[in-house]
Amino acid sequence: MKALFYPGCAMQKNARPYLDSLQAIREDIGLELREVEDWNCCGATEYMSVYRVAAHALVGRNLALAQDQAGDTRVLAAGCSACYLNLAKTDARMGEDAHLKATVNEALAAGGLEYRPGSLEVRHLLDLVCHDIGYEAVKARVVKPLHGLKVAAYYGCQVVRPDYDGRWDDHEHPTAMDKLLAVLGAEPVDWALKTQCCGGHMSVIGPEVAYGLIRRLVHGAQQAGADLVVTLCPMCQLNLDAYQVEMNRHFHSDYRMPVLYFTQLMGLAFGKPAKALGIGKEFVSAAPALARIQAEAPKVAETKRKRRPKPGDALPMPGME
Amino acid sequence: MAATPGDNRLDHCIQCGTCGGSCPSGAEMDHTPRRLFALIRAGERDAVLASNAPWYCVSCYYCTVRCPQDIRITDLMYTLKSMAIEAGLFHDASLPDFSETFVDYVEKYGRSFELGLATRFNLRHHPIGLAGMAPLGLGMLKRGRMDLLPQRIDNLAQLTAILDKAKALESPS
Ligand code: SF4
Ligand code: SF4
């Protein structure tokens, strides 16, 4: 399928592994993405906190550019939760509020642009993969099923809420990503925190609040028996991964829960080399968890130090490992 | 509050408390969303605009999907933040300052800039914390996950014209 693509600022850099893994699997699932030319920042959760109308105009420029560059598709895809929600929100609000629509378009006119709400379909990448491309098509590309890998599917907040277009089965306990991971051969664990907050911007402006939220999630995933957490958003990845290290320092704890993007796991199951998927750039290394599924690769990471037999040890028994 | 684009249902609030009970930041807020809305209706403007609640809101939208009265609570939090900045009543300047620093970068380059944002914000408000956060920054650089220079969009003039116009049209609250 064809779609316009809004990468957003984070994917350019801190979430580069997300973008790289997406590029690596794109052809396998027949996803043709065209980047919106000269897009600007969506404003995250900050622009809206300072200016209300201008925040919609900021996003409106992206929507107008995408609309004008659309050609043979009307799908506009984003990979980041905040980008996705901002695009969807401005489209929805302009559609329901004639006054806002007129005001935003008056601002856009200063740049020679106009946006007609509803002319684009704003979608998150996970939504496209699960609901348009479909589990069957994904399954058909799996050459190296992720058997034995326990994963905690983590959706965060802004993709499944408020969900203007009703694209998800549940706002608090969605299952789309769990199903996708199962199709890849992994085992999704049952856990209650899949749509709890990663801490958002609090990791910068009020770290203690964020550390509490991060600990709760990492702890919950661990309790559920997960080897790693799978995410769909650069902000969630950053908070749960990079700030997990800071959180450990803060609480004197020693959690080591790796956090990867769903596109990285798709790539592994499609048989792509880990490096091409940006694996290895995470702060909490995913190598020990992934060693479980690299069945035929030498298990370098897993070689245990040989234990000196102690007196009283029974004879080594086959099949005890 | 009528100024929130597309929303003014606050008078439908039944004070059920679902929002506060759902809020991951609730424990840290001086007023839960429910209390905040009671204060608004009581006309306690200054108490509302001095509250830390909107700044501690992480935009998780739990309250919004759970509110039995379909009040767009998260969006109201954004409105309260912009009103608080205008009124200058909030006691801890660092929280609004983060948003404003972010906005600055977006307006100057058309893109956000993590390194600049984190450094400028921490330099101003947590000079000691900055040293503590240095390993994280270095880790990001080492992993090729952070730019040293901001990126700039091509047609910045167009964006500037649009934002200037939008601000001029911003309804006075
Ligand atoms: S959940 Fe809705 S109705 Fe209940 S207190 Fe909060 S805003 Fe009011
Ligand atoms: S959106 Fe904000 S106010 Fe509502 S529950 Fe989440 S953090 Fe609390």
Image (tube, rainbow, N blue to C red):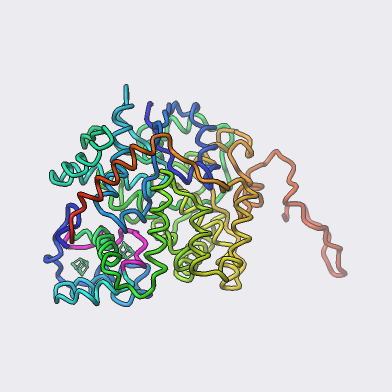
Tell me where the magenta segment starts and ends, as one range: B54-70
* Of residues A134 and B55, the one drawn nearer to the viewer in this rendering: B55
Ligand 1's quadrant = bottom left
Answer whether residue A179 is visible to the viewer in this image.
Answer: no
The image shows residue A61 at horizontal and vertical percentages of 31, 38
Q: Residue A249's quadrant in the figure? A: bottom right
Above/below status of A115 relative to A147? above
* Of residues B75 and A99, the one drawn nearer to the viewer in this rendering: A99
Q: Residue A101's quadrant in the figure? A: top left
A82 left or right of A239 in image: left
The quadrant of the image that shows the C terminus of chain A is: bottom right
The quadrant of the image that shows the N terminus of chain A is: top left
The image shows residue B150 at horizontal and vertical percentages of 51, 45
* Of residues A112 and A232, the one drawn nearer to the viewer in this rendering: A112
Q: Is residue B68 magenta?
A: yes
- Number of numbered tags placed on the structure image: 0
Q: Is residue B152 magenta?
A: no
The image shows residue A17 at horizontal and vertical percentages of 55, 42
Answer whether residue A57 is visible to the viewer in this image.
Answer: yes
Report the residue at 73% width, 52% height from top.
A302
A8 left or right of B51 in image: right
Report the residue at 25% width, 69% height from top.
B18
Q: Residue A205's quadrant in the figure? A: bottom left
Above/below status of A31 relative to A238? above
Above/below status of A179 relative to A189? above
Q: Please, which residue is most extreme toward the top here?
A: A72
The image shows residue A265 at horizontal and vertical percentages of 54, 42
* Of residues A102 and A135, the one drawn nearer to the viewer in this rendering: A102
